[in-house]
Amino acid sequence: MAFYFVQFLTGLASAASLFLVASGLSIIFGVTRIVNFAHGAFYMLGAYMAFTLTERFSGALGFWGGIVVAALIVAAIGVLVEMVLLRRIYHAPELFQLLATFGLTLMVQDIVVLIWGPDDLLGRRAPGFRGAVDFFGQNIPSYDLFLIALSPVVLGVLWLLFQRTRWGVLVRAATQDRDMVAALGVNQKWLFTSVFALGVFLAALGGALQIPRDAVHHALDLRIIVEVFVVVVIGGLGSIIGAFVAAVLVSELNAFGILIFPKISIILVFLVMAVVLIVRPWGLFGKPEAAARRTPGLTVNPWRPLTSGERLMSLGALVLAAMLPLFAGNYALTVGSEIAIYVIFAASLHFLMSVGGLASFGHAAYFGLGAYGVAFLAKAAGLPMIVSLLLGPLLGLLGAAVFGFFAVQLSGVYFAMLTLAFAQIVWSIAFQWVAVTGGDNGILGVWPDKWAAGPASFYWLSLAIAALAVTVLRVIVFSPFGFALRATRDSPLRSEAIGINGKRVQWTAFVISGTVAGIGGALFAYLKGSVFPDSLGISLSVDALVMVLLGGVETVSGAVIGAIVFKAANIWLVSQTDLSKLVLGGFIVLMVVAFPKGIVGTLETIRNRWRSPDTKSALLASRIETAE
Amino acid sequence: MSMAPTLLSVEALSKSYGGVHAVRSVSFELRAGEILALIGPNGAGKSTCFDMLNGQNIPDSGRITLLGEDTVGRKPRAIWRLGVGRTFQITATFPTMTVRENVQVALVSYGRQLFNLWGSTAQFARDEAGRLLDLVGMGAYAGRPCGELAYGDLKRLELAIALANQPKLLLMDEPTAGMAPRERIELMRLTARIAREQSIGVLFTEHDMDVVFEHADRILVLNRGSLIAEGSPEEVRGNPQVRAIYLGEGLVYDARHREGAGA
Amino acid sequence: MRRRHVLGAGLAIAVAGMAGSAMAQSEIKIGEINSYSLLPAFTEPYRKGWQLAVEEVNAAGGINGKKLVVISKDDGGKPADAQTAANELVSSENVAMLAGTFLSNIGLAVSDFANQKKVFFLAAEPLTDAITWSKGNRYTFRLRPSNYMQAAMLVEEAAKLPAKRWATIAPNYEYGQSAVAVFKKLMSEKRPDIQWVDEQWPPQGKIDAGPVVQAVAAANPEAILNVTFGADLVKLVREGNTRGLFKGRSVVSFLTGEPEYLDPLKDETPEGWIVTGYPWYDIKTPDHDKFLKAYQAKYNDYPRLGSIVGYQTIKAAAAILAKANSTDPEKLIAATEGLSMPSPFGEITFRKIDHQSTLGAYVGKTALKDGKGVMVNSVYRKGADYLPGDAEVAKLRPKE
């Protein structure tokens, strides 16, 4: 039937742009192991740049010239970013680059509004591709046909590039084993730069080619980035063919899925990803990831419990913090409560990420589940606050137990992506199931009981629970279980060989972490008096990652400091300026470059240097370093 | 020696990958206190054999009986619980812990305290860990970060970890790879002494023939997946077939293994 | 652990220090919150609107002699951040009332906050019916015509169409779902003969327009209801135009006549859609003329619907504060209930029964003029005529 054929072609056209962007991301990840969060930002810049070039300079370049030049300009920006920023942090702990590119993304969102204004921009239609082709009574836009033809061409060019050029051979070798390329004496710096440039070029081209179909606006980046991550992961990281097949798969499933379930789009890609990852843990065309390369020099400092002096000081600080209501106003106390809650949340992710070595990209799911748990209990069942607070986090526990079981079967980026998929599935349920969750209008009226309603009482409650959660997690870190968890993270091979059931240990850690996050969410519901789906959302998950990384992923107490600094800066900036994203993004990028070990990691290094000024060699000095 | 009980009995073990026979009907036995070397050129099937014994690889056919239990299909951790210690060709330790903590983790597992969320690991079996470290000569390094040990020390630490569950059998994959000659001899002497004292059976693969001939009670020679010779060092040394395919090449150890020895 | 508390305390001191001195007796503060960083396309004209109103109010002597000051905060598009901002405005800035918000969920979050903390809240732009009905509370009033009112205005026109086979396209979240639900309900009441042949629910902001257009076309409806807006609308229109979806079919579309949504479509604006909106170029009333001239003189730009809403929000707030002559929330509520005042769209009243204002909207058809989209044949529909009867409204609102 003509209709189904045209629907198929329409799906292919949607796949084309997805593929361009995804292949760029995949290439960059394959070689540099950078999870380039800014890929969506480059896509968006490509669209904006192409808009300007085709509107203002179409005389000189023509439409197509404008598209290509736009992609080239953005690729040049990419090169600049790689040389100035990323090069400095390749040796930082894994995922730190994610933080840097996240900061960039925030900045770009504000920068495009400053340059191009806030309005949606309507780009030109491609000359020669304005109309549609009639196919047995069905219309196919000719531009769709152009896109359908383009993506195999790009795939072919990339294939030739990788198979037939020396550069391509090096890239493939680097994808397999980075250290080997270094051993071959290849200038790794320029290999990375050129790969990054190619990846950014593809992203920008994908963006530029959208202007005849889409409006150009400042939220394009987030719209594409998550979907592209998903496509890359379904296809298998580093595999261009995989990206192609996954893009087609996702687009076609969507094109036909909406005929049967019109509401499927919102959840479809994540469902596909979850299924693929459970069945094929490395994606359709991916290979098992080589063991994570641990960076020497940063990871050798064994953790130690606080000395009794430090414990006293912590207690003193806690007492000091508890005295806040004596001199601060209601607003400061509420901000204090919010920060305390974020400390709980960040500490829970830190436990999973730093202690367990499992970086969750969807940790907000458990925070949000805790919040919804409280909302259901308090609103639907009418339970008193103390009972809801105790039982609400169990929803987080339940979610973590179910999702964690599947997620811990994977590791590294695949683990991150599966947790993201689960979080998105939970989010879409909360967002869509209006009858139960109220949809995006949320659940209102979850206010604390009288005894905790005052800002000071609630602050004390939050502070006490935060102190308790951080202490308990710390105790667990140094408990036999904590050591088993770290052992599993450090060397799966060795821990299996000493009888540790790594998956079960990690699953337990996942459940602990999810439950603690749920406790944070439960408090959050009472702080705000309401629950909305965005407490399950990606941006909250990313916030948590940023807090952990900012504090220092390889420290024990980094998350606490990271949460305080990030949340305080965030609240203050949002209150002070409409350009909070630009400032916050710039702050994050600066932090990453200046303090690649995070705030606490850097403080520790300084302290350790200062404590051993007279040791003769740096090596010796580093030997007595320990991480508090 | 022949009176000691049989620890490990391997019968007609086979494994092939896509038609290539990596291991072909290999059978042998190992007794308590015996030190048995498994040698052969690269690609002879030593690692595949080892992985099957260890539970990391499942044989196509054959039987492995360890301390009276059939271990085919069991996970490495289950085999460890039977009393098998293991060291790796490239050391596998926990670089973010101190030397003592490395051993303590193994002791935690042995004491079945893995899911103890509340105790303090620092005090857990501290003396036992110290004793094991002393045994391998690492007592002075107990508080050091493991990530900074020299490679030879890592090998000794790994031995201490492998001894934590009071094993009946040690499986050591190229125990001296990547070490300086003097260190090799020291490590193997240490291993042999502990094995004899505690009546532990040792099965090891090795490229360095000096090490093999000095320390092995018995030698198994693999070639292209098949066992081609078995016997005392003298017997194997005199075996013309072994000389032809292996020793005759003058290949005592593979230089590659000296590199790539990152912790 | 230690540093956390030191920092926490330090922060608190800093915040407390910033909290500002007691409200000066010579001024009245309004706390305003909106999604400035997330939705600048809508909130910039809105901000210009309220800034104009503040100028006018103060030029005319302020509020009973006191200067009107608006303290504006960004909510980043997040309900939780909006509450933080609301709290700051109330606790630290001691504002007399809260106003603003664009997104429905943020409007509801602030409304719930207002109810809990007993603060007066004038919701400017959120459309959800819940804010005045199912989740309405005594502290919250809303200015802009609601989802229900917009639907009722459109249904009046849609029911006149001969079309019997209808399809719907709406973003898959509460706004889209309730817009479709209300439209269907009202439409089926007036026209029991119509059939709903297809519904498409693309995710908000992520429409894959090609397949959606194809799917709707395959159901072969005679008329289409559209609820998508913004970038989704642009994609839908482009795909629909190219694929001929709108040829020979009637389209009824929420809000599309508002310049915010119509202008980006430029020369691709589809013609003949029945829409609600704001044809600022066609309104020839003295009230609007005065507003238009002042706005253009100040900003050298034309107003969007957001400008009207922003302008009228502050005008209404000023009228309320002037009448109450107090900042006591109870007195503000008493002053607002039943209060009538002029607006650029003519006189409006804040209803006592559900706290909804009777601000209306223009209904007309889209057309192309000089390569730009415009609304033609537009008629102003008074809000009061498109709200259900008092008995029904009373049932919708929770008991106090």
Image (tube, coloured by chain):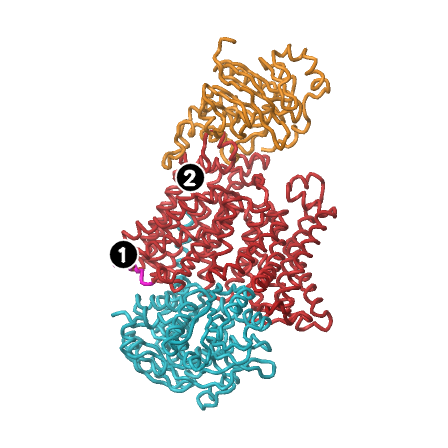
Chain colours: A red, B orange, C cyan
Task: Give the labeled residue for mark 1.
Answer: A381
**Can residue C332 be seen at all in this image of the molecule?**
yes
Q: Earlier in the sequence, mark 1 or mark 2?
A: 1
Task: Give the labeled residue for mark 2.
Answer: A477
Nearest the camera: B245 or C239?
C239
**Labels 1 & 2 near each other (Cβ < 8 A):** no
The local crowd at label 2, few if under 14, some if 14 to 19, many if 20 or more residues have their Cα within 10 Å, is many
**What is the magenta range?**
A444-453
Measuring from the top left, give residue C372's x and y in whole percent.
Answer: 58, 80
In the image, residue A189 above or below residue C126: above
- Hey, what amino acid is under mark 2? Val
Nearest the camera: B86 or B146?
B86
Which chain is home to disc 2? A
Measuring from the top left, give residue C302's x and y in whole percent.
Answer: 53, 82
Q: Which is more foreground, mark 1 or mark 2?
A: 1
- A234 in magenta: no
Asked where in the image residue C22 lies, by quadrant, the reply is bottom left
Asked where in the image residue C184 lies, by quadrant, the reply is bottom left
